[in-house]
Amino acid sequence: MSYMKKRNYFRLLFIVMLIILCFFIIFVSTLGVARIPLKESMKIILNNIPFIKNKISLEGISSSHVVIINKIRFPRIILSALIGMALAGSGVIFQGIFKNPMAEPYVLGISSGAAFGATLAIVLGIQSTILGMGAISIMAFLGAVTTTFIVYNVARIGNKTPVVTLLLAGIALSFLLSSLISLFMTFNREQVEKIVFWTMGSVSSASWKHVIISSPIILLGSIVFIIFSRDLNVMLLGEDSAKNLGVEVEKLKKILLIIASIVTASAVAVSGIIGFVGLVIPHIVRLIVGPDHRVLIPFTLISGALFMIITDTLARVLIPPVEIPVGVITSLFGAPFFIYLLCKNKKKNYMG
């Protein structure tokens, strides 16, 4: 397939995926304990869009349905999409930087840092809010960012940051923080259930405040990922080759590590730890569109959003009125696929 044909094919495929994403946003908003007709749901959602809202009539639609969509389901769906974009997009970046298909957003101890921050907030009973964000979310964000900062500075040797040292520092700090969390849980048994539930991941408390605060960070971070996609392609040739081609490797790694960590932290802060999204989605997309980051990153972002919307919908509708933590659903999908990848790679290596 020629370059122009391939580019047009990917453009068409991306438009199709956008249409599918929009359809799922409307479709899943109809699902739940209160069943809302698709036509009603579409009208209510379109009524939130500027330049359209004044042209959509909500006459004849139950006010309770309007409240359910606008205040509960729609912000939750949008937040799920943002979290999927954040985790999947960061997963691609970490895999590109580490040149390791098994890398994922939590590889630098971000999840452990977030969990430690959230645990501190729960144990200390901090109730204050800032810009509508609860103490648990704020402490989780600060814990994740602080952990990344510590790991990066521990791993840095002069002006260089060796990938292996970075990984080892992340693993060591993750174990340390996990031990501290276990210690807190031992001495605060009445808070164990709350801590465990947070670490399972959930979007049940989603609100428009969460969307408004997290969306600028995640969307701007995603744009940065796309901007540096060409440089990531060059880095796949090796750091020495990338330097010879004019890429400032250490500067690029620093920028992308910081941005990807902040994007991941902003997602974890509002949802808890949701595993396998940043590992599985980039793999699936890479199998479909190839390793070119100029194509891989945009498709991964939209696929991550779609995956999170579907899994979160399953989490809230499978066993009503009980809600399953979405992290459990993503793990049920992700773990078998991860095992499949390991077996496939093992077989490939064995066959030579």
Image: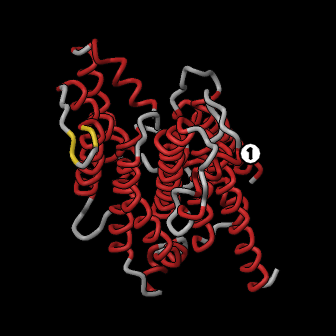
Q: Secondary structure at mark 1?
A: helix
Q: Is residue 266 left or right of residue 307?
A: left
Of all residues, the one furthest to the front in this rendering is 59
Q: How is the image coloured?
A: secondary structure
Where residue 104 appears, x then y in whole percent? Answer: 49, 50
Nearest the viewer among 128 and 244 is 128
Q: Looking at the picture, does residue 236 appear above or below residue 269?
A: below
Number of numbered discs: 1
Q: Looking at the picture, does residue 116 appear above or below residue 60?
A: above
Nearest the viewer among 62 and 349 is 62
Nearest the viewer among 352 and 112 is 112
Nearest the viewer among 185 and 302 is 302
Q: Quadrant of residue 244?
A: bottom left
Q: Is residue 30 left or right of residue 351?
A: left
Residue 261 visible somewhere in the drawing: no
Q: Residues within 10 Å of mark 1 (few under 14, many from 20)?
A: few
Residue at left offset 44%, top offset 78%: 240
Q: Which residue is mark 1?
A: 347
Where residue 158 appears, x then y in whole percent? Answer: 21, 67
Residue at left offset 57%, top offset 20%: 321
- Look at label 1 and name its amino acid: Lys
Residue 240 visible somewhere in the drawing: yes
Q: Looking at the picture, does residue 302 appear above or below residue 32?
A: below
Q: Looking at the picture, does residue 177 appear above or below residue 27?
A: above
- Give the quadrant of the N terminus: bottom right
Where residue 92 appears, x then y in whole percent? Answer: 53, 59
Q: Is residue 187 left or right of residue 7?
A: left
Where residue 63 appears, x then y in whole percent? Answer: 53, 39
- Give the quadrant of the C terminus: bottom right
Residue at left offset 62%, top offset 42%: 61
